[in-house]
Image (cartoon, rainbow, N blue to C red):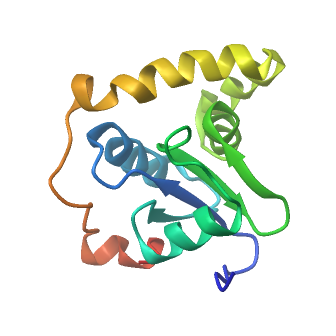
Amino acid sequence: MNIALPKNKQLILFDGVCNLCNSSVNFIIKNDKTNTFLFSALQSKSGKQIIEAYHIDTTKTDSILLYNPDKGISYKSSAALKIAWHLKGPLKLLTVFLIVPRFIRNWVYDIIARNRYRWFGKKEACMVPSPELKDKFLD
């Protein structure tokens, strides 16, 4: 896999056509206190490389992934909670939910993920970052 991230960076892979996912990316950018995250759509070249390298079944996991070059890949609720740890303010407190068994957290996560297009809508094409945010996106 040829995805080189700068030191101390993690990559958030998101569904580029999902309105909820795009809003979440904008929220993370605004609250990323340590400038930890880079972003790429699951539909992008780097997204497809990671999906292939980690043998991810996109019919089961298709909304958010967190790639850490040192620790590998996190899925679903674990990815969301690990992202929250790096955000400013009380959002870090959300990581307390890591004590909830993963199957319960992912059950709730899957309900939202399955209904995200119906509840929040869908774009025709992937989000195009503004020029000032371009350096936060791989491709």
Question: Where residue 40 sits in the image (x, y, percent)?
Answer: 46, 66
Query: As displayed, is residue 42 above or below residue 17?
Result: below
Q: Which quarter of the rendering shows the C terminus?
A: bottom left
The residue that appears at 20% across and 34% down in the rendered structure is: 121
- Lateral position of residue 119 relative to residue 36, left or right: left
Question: Nearest the camera: 116 or 5?
Answer: 116
Query: As displayed, is residue 26 above or below residue 39?
Result: above
The residue that appears at 48% across and 48% down in the rendered structure is: 28
Query: As displayed, is residue 29 above or below residue 38?
Result: above
Question: Nearest the camera: 93 or 17?
Answer: 17
Question: Where residue 29 sits in the image (x, y, percent)?
Answer: 45, 55
Residue 101 sits in which quadrant? Answer: top right
Is residue 98 shown to the viewer in this render? yes
The residue that appears at 51% across and 67% down in the rendered structure is: 47
The residue that appears at 25% across and 70% down in the rendered structure is: 130
- Lateral position of residue 105 relative to residue 29, left or right: right
Residue 92 sits in which quadrant? Answer: top right
Mark count? 0
